[in-house]
Amino acid sequence: MRGNDDGVRQDGRDDEHSTHSAGLAEDSPHRVSYDTPAKRPSQAVVEAVSEVTDTNLTDIGPLYSAIDPEALDKLFRRDDGRGAPTGRVTFALDGHEVTVRSGGVVEVRADGDDE
């Protein structure tokens, strides 16, 4: 599946849990797509890290220790009438580098991996 320059899928699919790579290969992140109107980015982040680490959602460190969940959700909200937001945010959570991209994509990689 080819994506654009920032790695967002081009096929228009909005599968809630579309996993594009299994596990954490050294050269590529674990990438998950989520349904942007139905799910908040903050929720998708916790679920993606849980999936990668094979950990219960409640056992992951608090998201607010890494980033303000409300601010993250507002960055990628589509209800302002100006069209879909663009961009990405990267932060560390539970020993992983997490990138949230516009278009409903979360990438998780082990801290220290090069992009």
Image (cartoon, grey):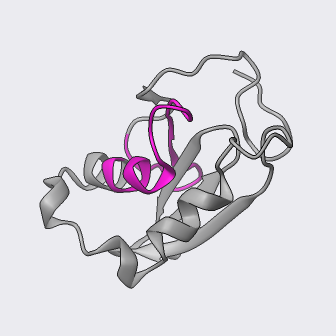
Which residue is pictured at 83% across the width and 38% down the height?
83
The foreground one among 9 and 79 is 79
Q: Is residue 56 visible?
A: yes
* Residue 108 x/y as whole percent: 48, 56
Q: Count the marks: how many? A: 0
Please determine whether, in this image, residue 75 is positioned above or below residue 16: below
Which quarter of the rendered picture does the N terminus lie within?
Answer: top right
Please determine whether, in this image, residue 2 is positioned above or below residue 68: above
Which residue is pictured at 40% across the width and 36% down the height?
22
Which quarter of the rendered picture does the C terminus lie within?
Answer: bottom right
Examine the image and state in which quarter residue 13 appears. top right
Magenta span? 23-47
* Residue 99 x/y as whole percent: 59, 60
The foreground one among 96 and 48 is 48
Taking 18 as reference, is 58 left or right?
Answer: left
The foreground one among 112 and 79 is 79
* Residue 75 x/y as whole percent: 67, 60
Taking 6 as reference, is 25 left or right?
Answer: left
Which residue is situated farthest in the bottom direction here? Answer: 65
Examine the image and state in which quarter residue 37 appears. top right
Examine the image and state in which quarter residue 4 appears. top right
Please determine whether, in this image, residue 3 is positioned above or below residue 15: below
Magenta region includes residue 73: no
Which residue is pictured at 76% across the width and 25% down the height?
2
* Residue 110 x/y as whole percent: 44, 66
Which residue is pictured at 26% across the width and 52% down the height?
50
Q: Is residue 115 visible?
A: no
